Image (cartoon, rainbow, N blue to C red):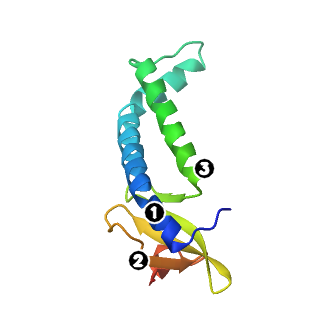
Amino acid sequence: MKLFTVEEANALLPSVRQLLKRLQRFRRNLSAYKAEVRQAAEQAEQGGGGIPGGLLYARLLTNFAGEMSNLETMGVQLKDFERGLVDFPSLRDGRVVLLCWQLDEGDELEWWHDMDAGFGGRTPL
């Protein structure tokens, strides 16, 4: 697990913000195929199944997975797609905590919480 200083996490926020916006867009676009994917999965058991626009769906899914991989490679933990909530593991007073940030917040981290506290346990930095 990568540990971030507040400064390192803040430096990543512009990239994380753009990545989260792309992930949200891909997820919205993928959800438009929900019914078609379910139907294709049901038909696949009987030897056939495809979805209209399947190539576009596959491309969206590949892009989504790639962006998730990019976030994971950075060491950032995605907690909530809709809110764009992420955590950055960090060391505070000799223990691992999570620096907490979401898309609608500013350009710098302002919150942290213990590993087991979650969003409700956020404390100002």
Cα separation, mark 2 vs mark 1, equals 14 Å
User: Is 23 drawn above or below residue 117 in the view shown?
Assistant: above
Give me the disc on residue 73.
3
Dot 1: what SS? helix
For residue 82, what is the image quadrant?
bottom left
Q: Amino acid at mark 2?
A: Glu
Image marks 2 and 1: residues in contact by CB distance under 8 Å: no
Q: Quadrant of residue 2?
A: bottom right
Q: Nearer the viewer, residue 32 or 8?
A: 8
Element class at badge 2 = loop
Dot 2 surroundings within 10 Å: few (below 14), some, or many (20 or more)?
some
Q: Amino acid at mark 3?
A: Thr
Above or below, comparing residue 87 to residue 51 in the picture: below
Disc on res. 78: none
Q: Label 2: which residue?
A: 110
Left or right: where 44 falls relative to 31? right
Do we see residue 81 in this rendering?
Answer: no
Say the numbered circle drawn on residue 11: 1
Query: Which quadrant holds the N terminus?
Result: bottom right
Which residue is drawn at the image coordinates 49% and 81% (left, top)?
A: 121
User: At x 40% / y 77%, what residue is drawn?
Assistant: 110
Q: Quadrant of the C terminus?
A: bottom left
- Residues under labels 3 and 2: Cα distance? 23 Å
Q: Residue at x 41, y 41 (%)?
A: 27
Please, what secondary structure does the residue beneath circle 3 have?
helix
In depth, the one of 13 and 46 nearer the eye is: 13
Q: Is residue 5 left or right of residue 96?
A: left
Task: Measuring from the top left, give residue 88's x and y in whole percent.
Answer: 54, 66
- How crowded pointer 1 is (Cα within 10 Å; few <14, some 14-19, many 20+) is rated as some
